Amino acid sequence: MPHQFHDSLGEIEWIARPRLTQLRRLGVESVEDLLRHYPRRHEDRREFANFPSEESEQPICLCGEVVKTQIKRFGGWKKIFEVTLEQSDAHALSQPLVCRWFNVHYVQKMIFGDQRLVVFGKPRLRGKRICMEHPEFEIIENDEEISIHFRRIAPIYPATEGLSQRVLRGLIFRLLDECEDDGLAIIRELHFPRSWESLGSVREALVREEFLDMQMLIGLRRARARLRNGRANDAEGKLLERFLRALPFSLTNAQARVLEELRRDLRSPLPMNRLLQGDVGSGKTVVAIAAMLLAVESGSQAALMAPTQILAEQHYEVLRRWLEPLGVAISLRTGARSADGPTLFTNPQIFVGTHALLFEPEGLENPGLVVIDEQHKFGVAQRARLTSFEPAPDVLVMTATPIPRTLSMTLYGDLDVATIDEMPADRGRIVTAARDESKLPEVLAFLRRELEAGRQIYIVYPLIDESEKLDAKAASAEFEKWRERLRPFSCELLHGRIPAPEKQAIMDRFRRGLTSALVSTTVIEVGVDVPNATVMLIENAERFGLAQLHQLRGRIGRGEHKSYCILLSSDPSPETLAKLQVLEKTSNGFAVAEADWELRGPGDLLGTAQSGLPALKLGNLRTDAKLMQEARVVAQKILRDDPDLARPENQRFRDFVVEEENFSHVS
């Protein structure tokens, strides 16, 4: 019986029940879900190339016989699993190919002698041998479906545990044969193309369609925001002038420029929706405070929402120190703590908090400006809840994760973008060095020298507790070792599971210099500001993304002293080395973001779920940037020609709201 796109896979008898569970892990439940589970790439298996004699930056697809497997040990307990392949063609003169996997234990349970493998990776010269390190692989099985998997341009899919490429490919091949749908030809050609030319053509058509849908969602969201009734926060600016005069520093030219942009937006009766981006330490918070003062002087309230209690409390203390002398009343709202400024103020004018602001808005009755810090850590539904007042408040969202232009055009296409692209002159210089973990004794000696000079240090780990599944060190397990290593200097442990009051006390002691070393997880990633902390050691640095490493590094270099970030890694692969070298070469967050974009390819840099947009199934925001720009132009023209599309009574608007709710993420 033919299948329809909307049919559930559970209704198809030949799909085994365990397969349904595996497919659900990929978000696949219907016929359409599976047919739109697009390949992430294709391999030309019509004719395999000879084994190479030189290394290459381009990954290649090869086929060979397993003639030898062995396990080598290094560093005491670590393993390398090596597989030697010879070309299947008996007449080939190529030298063998060695495939190596570092500490990937499951691979040795899958590959045995006399198997035929297809491998995909970059050939590297290691001594006199050509090697592939951590290649993708597929075991050739002599079954009746061999023509599905070989002698063609074969699709390679995003997969999951227990669901091999061969199984996925077979499921999709059969389902395509049993489906009835007018649009099936183009999807069939995308999965199993007749040629590279036809694949390019159908892929471009589908990417255009996907990008246009996304840009219509973004355009409708932007148009909807402009339909709301806003307010003009048109202050004279006397309170702002007093604040700026009292600062112990002058604004940079970039800060002054962005403040003027915000001031123009605040004066307008249209609701402001602006993204403020700037590198770590560029002074975004000062600009945001200045904007809040303009709202307060206009007779409105302002709210500042931060993603963590530590950051919210730090913002609260900064605002109290700077603004209470100006007579501005401030209130703190977090899940564990609430506080108001001096009792002589009865009605708070500025509210600072975490998610608790969403659920404890008592007193926040007249918000003229809502500022959301590190906004990518909030879901779109959370932001909407805080900004749903009438009249609509102005909204300023801030990020210290610089965003490549193509990505910002997508994730933040409904926002105007302001950029602080200049660092304050008094920031200390940060030297970054990537080192193998075998260098820990030398690193320890350096840390002790810095402590003896009166400085403080961070030691950061990717995990709180040790994990059997992950080959990574953990803060809790390593803490006692550091206490011994650093005696007599004081050392404390900080992570997300420590109760909030204790966490705050630990941070207070570190800020005041009572603690010399802080062993921590990424809970210190944003907002922690200790000018005397000049060294950060990050263990298992290979387990962090570039943007996150740059964020962590931004916790040092906040005072006058020269600072040092040491990236210790247990992964000797060229990919890890290339990633960490980016941070050695530059401290510019925008350059780091572009490099991250290049290294991670089509991966989602910040997560489209947080933006309320569907994840892209096929389009690549980096390599398909031209198509995204074209889709943006088309969507803008559609909305310009028919502005009524954005009105709530329009069916397309209602569809948009439903889709936005479906894709919203609420943590």
Image (cartoon, helix red, strand yellow):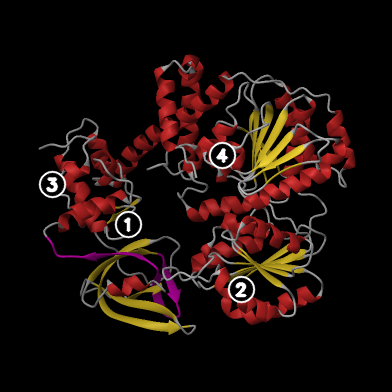
Name the element at disc 1: loop
Name the element at disc 2: helix
Identify the amino acid type marked 4. Answer: Ser
Q: Nearer the viewer, residue 398 or 178?
A: 398
Q: Quadrant of the N terminus?
A: top left
Q: Which residue is mark 2?
A: 479
Q: Which residue is mark 1?
A: 160
Label 3 to label 4: alpha-carbon separation: 45 Å
Mark found first going from the N terminus, 2 or 1: 1
Q: Nearer the viewer, mark 1 or mark 3?
A: 3
For this view, does 329 lie left or right of residue 198? right
The residue sitting at 52% across, 53% down in the picture is 598
The residue sitting at 80% across, 76% down in the picture is 452
Mark found first going from the N terminus, 3 or 2: 3
User: Based on the displayed image, in which of its 4 quarters is residue 274 positioned?
Assistant: top right
Q: Nearer the viewer, mark 4 or mark 1?
A: 1
Give residue 408's mark: 4
Label 2 neighbourhood size at 10 Å, few (<14), some (14-19), many (20+)?
some
Residue 656 percent location from the top left of the image = 43, 27
